[in-house]
């Protein structure tokens, strides 16, 4: 980590520039999730006392539904609940969020679920939920005076960072494994001249990123030294679900688990809405979804243990393939406490999930979404999820990014000559 | 055309089912754009008197900004201005529209335009503006009692129809050329079991579609026999631009031209908003954008003639490659009358346009968008567009669908070993 950007210093020391008033909105400190120790808001992610993960803590003022509803049709309508300044809309950003919450009658009928909704984040600016978290990381980078915006990534995160950095006009460097498929390289390279291919796997790229963060000054790595701010962006998924349901919480939510951050933040969002009186308090169950080829959290859940045993990922759901998930233990805690579970499905079930969602609701999802839909199906069939309760399933991204997953599953029903007789003979 | 679906019959005769009250909202007739002859609302697209194109005509009630603003965050907020029933939100559809209108400071700076906006339709459900028109066609198909929803297409339209049909639970058949690249096939096949590959080019596929429409009953081909309803969906682009600017019209708009329908409908939308008192009347200029490899409208504009001479398309901008554009003459009329122009750019300029938009505004557009941005640049440089006036450029789709266009243009700046020393040596 950067000597300047990551040590437990006062934020104003970050780049020698004083933080402006309200740089982080109603956020008041970074608080250790393990020991509760608090430090000033700044580019840190590990507790100086116990090395536990730091999380943004707030002093919320009174916030009303009307204030939120009068805001822009993107995540900044919730700016009072995020670590961003009140003038965040003035700074160029990709304006993500407020994506569709679709009533999924067809999928519900197929699975036997009475009231099912799909929260569809494939319609975000770079077509995944990562635009939400990156927008919050960008704001932190800007307020902290960072001069370079960066990430190591193999996919959605790289796209989101490269796009947000371009629009913000900040120098942006994205690190990818050099063996990444060419279309995925292009999908980030189109936004930035500073795409760096690294000979090695994702772990090597990640290590290099940390090394650079430790040597260079003024770098904001979205998922490293500004991670606490970044992670808060996922709360907006929870806020939007509640608002779009008419300011109430669903009974059950199914969420994919990679690092586990998204699931914990949706829970945090629900709790905040209750505490602020924006929704009525009620019980809700949260379920985690993993691919069997990388299911350390599901395994721990089923084994009834509190510790996550890291695994070596082997699944087509690459965007969920984190073998040692940082927030895994918190996912376990939330799912157990809320009465949910953590389940996993095979790669074949992932593929089935993609086709099922497309053919029932017209949403072409990526492998992460196929995992979540596959797990939803398994949860119903195994009696873990109550089909009579209102349920929301989150789709985090879009299918064109992982199109190979279904290449052998779907295709033309017939290939014909261009005549009516030829068509009639198909009996379609 | 189908004997049942396309003759000038009363709509109730379409499938033997009576039309319900308000099936088409405030629409009152189909009116011939050439001779003004009117026929009842139904599955027709050509004037029975002169074979001119039929267009939806309305009796609008008073409509207020407040009514619109209280509507859903998709195209149905404008349902009073579309040929759809008042309960349209109740019928499963993809809920497209109300996409981002981004203030494009960086692109404006690069091109020397003071106030530039990008209307970004790449965030629609299937990532192009086609979701708007298909949603209107779907409503018409439903109200007319069609039992099959269909289209011939090579790209965006196929995706939009297959997705909308799946979500609506209507039998959907999509016809594509059999030599279409595999990823494009998958991107439609994932939504429907009835994808039909046809040995031939797009013209062959189109002819087959018309033949089938003439032989089969109950088919709604979105861009054939329900085309007048379909085309109205493009008006929502114009409504949204005006509403998102704070209920006023821009001074200049640059719009891609394939059939030319979208451009004419944005103009129609602006005129309707003025007539309804929803925006102040003011002059605005409309510009058409084509790729030089298929630029029959730009050629006619520059030659100062009224007739379009059909061309054989040869451009990477496949979604604009209509050699004989149905609405070309109306595009000429609108651009001339409004003081705009129709311009075209080379395939290399299209590629440049894609990279320029991505690197300035973080939007990865398809070749059609690259064409529009390329033309915008050319319009400024050639003095055809006034850089001191407020300008909107429309992005109709997303870059992953035409990723090959920039495959040779962008890529990693460096490929390095996973060490800080290797990174430092790049001087990035």
Image: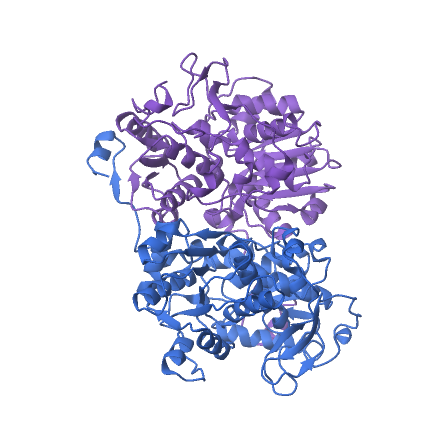
Chain colours: A purple, B blue
For the N terminus of chain B, the image quarter is bottom right
**Residue at left offset 55%, top offset 69%:** B265
- Give percent across and percent down for residue B287: 43, 69
**Residue at left offset 55%, top offset 77%:** B207
Residue most extreme to the left: B425
- In the rendered view, does A347 fall on the left or right side of A387? left
Q: Nearer the viewer, residue A34 or A232?
A: A232
**Residue at left offset 42%, top offset 72%:** B340
Q: Is residue B310 visible?
A: yes
For the C terminus of chain B, the image quarter is top left
| The image quarter in which residue A211 lies | top left
Q: Nearer the viewer, residue A317 or A271?
A: A271
Q: Nearer the viewer, residue A287 or A403?
A: A287
| The image quarter in which residue A98 lies | top right
- In the rendered view, does A154 fall on the left or right side of A387? left
- Give percent across and percent down for residue B380: 33, 65
State whether residue B148 is above or below residue A49.
below
- Give percent across and percent down for residue A397: 51, 44
Q: Is residue B192 visible?
A: no
- Give percent across and percent down for residue A312: 44, 28
- In the rendered view, does B275 fall on the left or right side of A326? right
Residue most extreme to the bottom: B49
State whether residue A9 is above or below residue B42.
above
């Amino acid at each position: 980590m950067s000597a300047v950007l990551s040590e437990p210093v006062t934020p104003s020391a970050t780049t020698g520039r004083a933080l402006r008033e309200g740089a982080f909105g109603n956020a008041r400190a970074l608080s250790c999730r393990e020991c509760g120790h608090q430090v000033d808001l700044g580019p840190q992610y590990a507790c100086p006392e116990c090395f536990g993960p730091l999380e943004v803590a707030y002093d919320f003022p009174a916030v009303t539904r009307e204030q939120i509803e009068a805001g822009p049709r993107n995540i900044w309508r919730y700016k009072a609940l995020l670590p961003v300044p009140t003038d965040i809309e003035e700074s160029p950003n990709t304006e993500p969020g407020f994506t569709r919450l679709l009533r999924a009658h067809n999928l519900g009928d197929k699975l036997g679920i009475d009231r099912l909704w799909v929260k569809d984040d494939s319609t975000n600016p770079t077509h995944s939920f990562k635009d939400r978290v990156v927008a919050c990381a960008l704001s932190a980078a800007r307020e902290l005076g960072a001069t370079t915006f960066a990430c190591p990534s193999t996919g959605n995160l790289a796209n989101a960072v490269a796009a947000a950095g371009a629009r913000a006009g900040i120098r942006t460097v994205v690190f990818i494994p050099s063996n990444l498929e060419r279309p995925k390289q292009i999908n980030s390279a189109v936004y930035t001249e500073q795409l760096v291919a690294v000979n090695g796997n994702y772990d090597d790229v990640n290590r290099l990123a940390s090394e650079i963060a430790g040597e260079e000054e003024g770098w904001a790595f979205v998922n490293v030294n500004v991670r606490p701010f970044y992670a808060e962006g996922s709360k907006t998924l929870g806020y939007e679900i509640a608002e779009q349901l008419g300011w109430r919480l669903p009974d059950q939510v199914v969420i994919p688990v990679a690092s586990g951050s998204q699931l914990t933040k949706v829970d945090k969002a629900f709790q905040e809405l209750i505490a602020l009186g924006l929704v009525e308090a009620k019980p809700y169950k949260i379920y985690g979804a993993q691919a069997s080829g990388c299911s350390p959290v599901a395994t721990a859940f089923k084994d009834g243990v509190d510790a996550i045993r890291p695994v070596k990922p082997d699944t087509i759901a690459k965007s969920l393939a984190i073998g040692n998930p940082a927030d895994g233990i918190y996912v376990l805690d939330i799912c157990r406490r809320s009465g949910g579970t953590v389940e996993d499905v095979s790669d074949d079930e992932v593929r089935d999930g993609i086709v099922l969602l497309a053919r029932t609701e017209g949403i072409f999802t990526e492998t992460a979404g196929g995992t979540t839909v596959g797990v939803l199906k398994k949860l119903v069939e195994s009696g873990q999820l109550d089909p009579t309760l209102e349920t929301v399933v989150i789709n985090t991204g879009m299918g064109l990014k992982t199109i190979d997953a279904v290449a052998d599953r779907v295709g033309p029903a017939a290939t014909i000559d261009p005549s009516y007789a030829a068509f009639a003979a198909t009996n379609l």
